[in-house]
Image: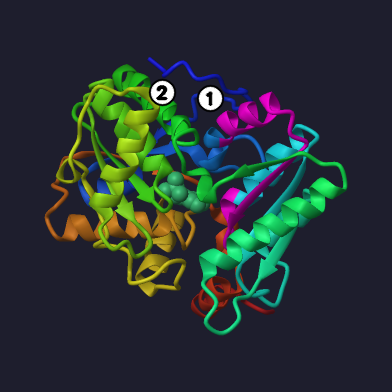
Amino acid sequence: MSLGIEKTCFLNVPTPLQRLDRISADLGVDLYLKRDDLTDFGTGGNKLRKLEYFLKDAEDKGASMLLTVGGAQTNHGRLTAAVAAKYGLKAAIVAVDPYPGEISANLLLDGIMDCHVYLAEPKEGQKESVLLEQTVTEVTAEWEARGEKVYYIPMGGSNELGALGYYDCALELDAQVRQLELADPRVFVTVGSMGTYIGMASAFANEHLPMKLTGIGVLPYRDIQRSAAEYYERMRAAYGLPEELKAEDFDVTSAYDCGGYNNPVAEVREAIYYMGRMEGIILDPCYTGKTFCGMLRMIGEGKIRKGDTLIMLHTGGIPGIYTKHHRTEMEKELMDHIHIL
Ligand SMILES: Cc1ncc(COP(=O)(O)O)c(C=O)c1O
């Protein structure tokens, strides 16, 4: 049962749950992909489910503009821009990041959808979080002086409200799993700002869904299980969820973060090429490629066994392959596929 909080529905769901036949045969597992990369707007991705809730809240508050924060290449910002465009709202993104030297990937899509991106670089000794807050305040004041009513969405859409999008997704997935009669599937989810994972973990625990959930952290967390427990406590407080969970109840790991966030990693690119060459499906270098790379490593380490039923959530992020620091690495590796006649 969903938690009864209203949202503005704009997604064509359920998203497909597809079996990856060739990879399953190759690895000796039963692997499915939940295609949240195929959600409707702005080239798709997981943030749209969160944005259904934010949009409703923004509409209720009479907002005329959505403003969010993230890195210069934020997927969440791009999808906020898409929803704003679809509903006739203005959009802005504030990032503490240098200008990357080119308008590519998400930055390009942001501009196409008329979203303004504010890039602030910290001066010596300036704390990034302070600069971000200051810049959000300034940009908000600037637009409000022009008559807009600004609705603020936190980084990655990860608060108690945004996570509900993935509470709903867990229920949707459960119905698909029952229909396909999959036994004891283990679901793998990317963990960035954590709203996707916590939304699903909240539903798994409180709706007693017969599936396991594993979160793969793609950025360095000091203590990822503790962060999960703290976020879950906020969900419990907000919605009165009955299940009490401790840090060790969360199967979430930083072991496959490859030592950084959005860093180019040869092994991750190998995982992306493997998926592309075996299934014709594109993963991204920051989130889904790293998660799939982690799953491949877990198979090698015996943490996933032959014959296991696995579901990976494809959360989108594909524009990331067009960012300079990833693209140039791939260009070097793929040059042998270009034949100039
Ligand atoms: C493509 C993609 N996948 C996964 C995630 C992680 O989701 P969350 O931030 O809810 O953990 C993000 C977050 O930005 C994303 O853009």
Q: Is residue 66 magenta?
A: yes
The image quadrant of residue 264 is bottom left
**Along the line of sight, the residue nearer the viewer: 23 or 206:** 206
Which numbered tag is attached to residue 172? 2
Residue 265 sits above or below residue 238 on the image: below
Between the residue at mark 1 and the residue at mark 2, the CA separation in whole angstroms equals: 8 Å
Position in image of residue 192 (x %, y %):
41, 53
The image quadrant of residue 250 is top left
Q: Locate the N terminus and report the quarter of the image it occupies.
A: top left
On whether ligand 1 comes within 8 Å of the CB at mark 2, the answer is no
- Colour pattern of the rendering: rainbow
- Give the residue furthest to the right: 146
Q: Which residue is mark 1?
A: 13
Position in image of residue 28 (x %, y %):
20, 47
Q: Amino acid at mark 2?
A: Glu
The image quadrant of residue 199 is top left
Instruction: Count how many numbered circles sit on residues in the image.
Output: 2
Is the Cβ of the residue at disc 1 closer than 8 Å to that at disc 2? yes
Mark 2 nearby-residue class (10 Å; few <14, some 14–19, many ≥20) = some
Which residues lie in the magenta part?
A: 51-76
Position in image of residue 341 (x %, y %):
69, 79
- Kind of element beneath mark 1: loop
Name the residue rendered at 37%, 59% in the picture: 218
Name the residue rendered at 33%, 72% in the picture: 259
On whether ligand 1 comes within 8 Å of the CB at mark 1, the answer is no
Question: Is any part of residue 256 visible from this angle?
Answer: yes
